Amino acid sequence: MKKGITILVSVLLLLALTACGGEKTTGPEMEYGNSDLYTKEEMDAAVAAIRAEFDTWDGCELHALRYAGDGSASQENLDWMNELRKDGDAFTQCIEFLSDFHSPKDEAASSALGVEADQEYRDFRWWLARSDGGDWQLMTWGY
């Protein structure tokens, strides 16, 4: 009898643990690529700034984020980031990420974000800049 209760409790515990797991949310697929300019930690800091903005987009589901590559950190793009700068020190570095996400199904929510409702967006751009290794500032996003 004691052995039967032990088995029953073990099975119930196993079922409870599996049920609690449900669907795993691992977050978006991340692609860091290879960079001679930025470490993974520096890219993670930029990703955190992107996620802080994206997480306010109600109804959107982020599927992937990719580093666009060192070529996006050109002087031309850095000059562009400095043109967008409102105040503070001139930026010395810029970085670009691309994202894939699904827009909200709700028309009003999509419209508020400036995206089409219930659509898959690919290669949506995110531009960030910083001064002398400081914090990344999200400057602009879109196509």
Image (cartoon, rainbow, N blue to C red):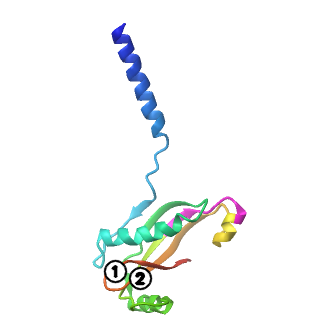
- Find out whether residue 107 is within the magenta segment: yes
User: In which quadrant of the rendered view does residue 112 lie?
Assistant: bottom right
Where is residue 119 drawn, in percent x and y?
A: 63, 63
Q: Is residue 109 left or right of residue 134?
A: right
At x 37% / y 77%, what residue is drawn? 135
Residue 132 belongs to the span the image colors magenta:
no
Seen as rendered, the residue at the extreme front is: 88
Residue 42 vs residue 89, the one in the foreground: 89
Q: Residues within 10 Å of mark 1 (few under 14, many from 20)?
A: few
Name the image quarter holding residue 105: bottom right
Q: Is residue 116 left or right of residue 124?
A: right
**Residue shown at 34% from the left, 69% from the top:** 33
Q: Residue flagged by tag 1: what amino acid is it?
A: Gly
Q: Please, what is the three-letter code of the amino acid marked with disc 2?
A: Ala
Residue under label 1:
134
Quadrant position of residue 41: bottom left
In whole angstroms, how far apart are the C-alphas of marks 2 and 1? 9 Å
**SS for dot 1:** loop
Quadrant for the C terminus, please.
bottom right
In the image, residue 138 lies at what x, y percent?
Answer: 47, 77
Find residue 94 and name its label.
none
Who comes first in sequence, dot 2 or dot 1? Answer: 2
- Image quarter (top left, top right, bottom left or bottom right) of the N terminus: top left
Q: Residue at x 48, y 67 (%)?
A: 52
The residue stretch that appears in magenta: 99-108
Q: Residues within 10 Å of mark 2 (few under 14, many from 20)?
A: many
Q: Is residue 20 left or right of residue 39?
A: right
**For mark 2, what is the residue?**
129
**59 w.r.t. 43: above or below:** above
